[in-house]
Amino acid sequence: MKALNKKNISTIISASWIFTSDLESQLLSDYSVVIDNDKIIDLLPQSKVFNEYEAHDTYQLTDHILIPGLINTHAHAAMSLFKSFADDLPLHDWLNNHIWPAEKEFVSPSFVKDGSILALSEMIKSGITTFNDMYFYPNETAEAAKELGVRGNIGLVVLNFPTNYATDPEDYLLKGFGFRDKWRNEELITTSIAPHAPYSVSDEAFTMINTYSEELRISIHTHLHETKWEIEDSIGKYGMTPVQRLNNLGIIGPSLMAAHCVHCNDQDMAILAKNKVSIIHNPSSNMKLGSGIADVARMLEQSLNVCLGTDSSASNNRLDILEEMRLAALLIKGSTNLPESMPIKEAIKMATINGAKALGLDGIIGSIEKNKKADLVAIDLSKIENQPIYDPLSTLVYSSSRSDVNYVWINGKLKLKDKKLVQINEEEIIQLAKKWQIKLKKI
Ligand SMILES: [Zn+2]
């Protein structure tokens, strides 16, 4: 009789360990996550799950840890086509003499679509289920996200100078809002206004952006205090730091996601903390461009929400939040001489729930809880390099790597199975990248 009462659902995932990343930060042993369509509907011991549920698909993942999908809170997906294109240069030389001239010649809707497909394929293989993007031709980035079924918050980029995409701030915004209207009802796509940076956007444009952000209740995603040059340039032109200038213009607030914040004085830090800004820490990109190391210890002391980003493949050159998490956990210890800084669970939260909070999506993603969307990653800890496992969370943060990412689900749908992309032929993506490599090499 009991079997007749079982509830039919889509998927049961049973794993040796589950880290919930919720308020209780629970590490559960031998538990199962029950998924129906796109949602997590239950979390219960493996010994009980089959008494209550009958699933279309079941996964028994021994020696795996199941965590919420990783959130890449700062990306320029299409720039994956610039991976290894220009390395070992300071930001302004890199941008002015390499990236911007190449963008002028090559960036088009097809470049953005193909580059985004390449980036999102890499992100899925790295356990990333949500990305927060800023680039030209957002429609093509959204199309790539829709095709691969990745959750994306896509920026409506604004610059003060013309590019292949738009001519001036009004034109960028006009195109951005057209894109936003078109994708308004797409479940996996949300939007932010994305003024590129204080040095590339005028006071007038920031004022306009602030008005739209308040009227439409749309968040803002920008680069802020990435280099010492940016701050010196701002003090020279405006008599104040970029944080102080943006504060005067009304941009600094709880709906701001500020990438980098590497060089902040006490006054800047107090403004960011008072206004509950979300800070996106991009340790690899900051180190590769020689920009510096963000003072995350001070940010955490001030209770700022700190999340993680890869930045683009042109300045990283891997889209790997597990690596950013490990680096963040190590850099804070190395720079403060305090090994107790950023305990393991805090590092995992930076890679998951904190990113969801920054995006305003913590009601639906970022943790493994009933009624949240089933964005999940199963990481195989069975290999030699992960043995022995006294603490699976320590193994996850300090020993494992993206090559251990075995399964990925987004919105309840399987995206990676046995380390292979489910929906797309990996060889075709490699050929797509090679096609652009031949074109770009001619510059
Ligand atoms: Zn960036």
Image: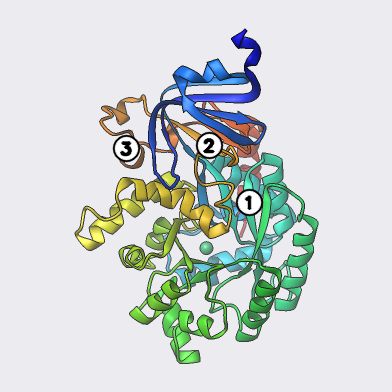
Picture residue at 51% right of the left edge, 49% below the top: 71
User: Where residue 78 sits: x, y (%)?
Assistant: 62, 54
Under tag 2, what secondary structure? strand
Gap in Å between the C-alphas at discs 2 and 3? 20 Å
User: Where residue 207 sits: x, y (%)?
Assistant: 64, 82
Under tag 1, what secondary structure? strand
Q: Residues within 10 Å of mark 1 (few under 14, many from 20)?
A: many
Residue on which disc 3 sits: 399
User: For the residues carrying marks 1 and 2, which lies nearer the camera in this image?
Assistant: 2
Q: Is residue 299 above or below residue 236?
A: above
Instruction: Kindly identify the amino acid type of the residue bearing the numbered disc 2.
Output: Leu
Picture residue at 39% right of the left edge, 68% below the top: 291
User: Where residue 7 sits: x, y (%)?
Assistant: 64, 21
Residue on which disc 1 sits: 152
Whether residue 409 appears in this view of the structure is: yes
- Left or right, 122 with respect to 385, comes to right
For the C terminus, the image quarter is bottom right
Instruction: Kindly identify the amino acid type of the residue bearing the numbered disc 3.
Output: Ser
Q: Residue furthest top?
A: 1
Residue on which disc 2 sits: 376
Q: Earlier in the sequence, mark 1 or mark 3?
A: 1
Q: Earlier in the sequence, mark 1 or mark 2?
A: 1
Whether residue 228 appears in this view of the structure is: no
Q: Are marks 2 and 3 in contact (CB under 8 Å)?
A: no
Q: Are marks 1 and 3 in contact (CB under 8 Å)?
A: no
Q: Is residue 288 above or below residue 35?
A: below
Q: Is residue 142 above or below residue 424?
A: below
User: For the residues carrying marks 2 and 3, which lies nearer the camera in this image?
Assistant: 2
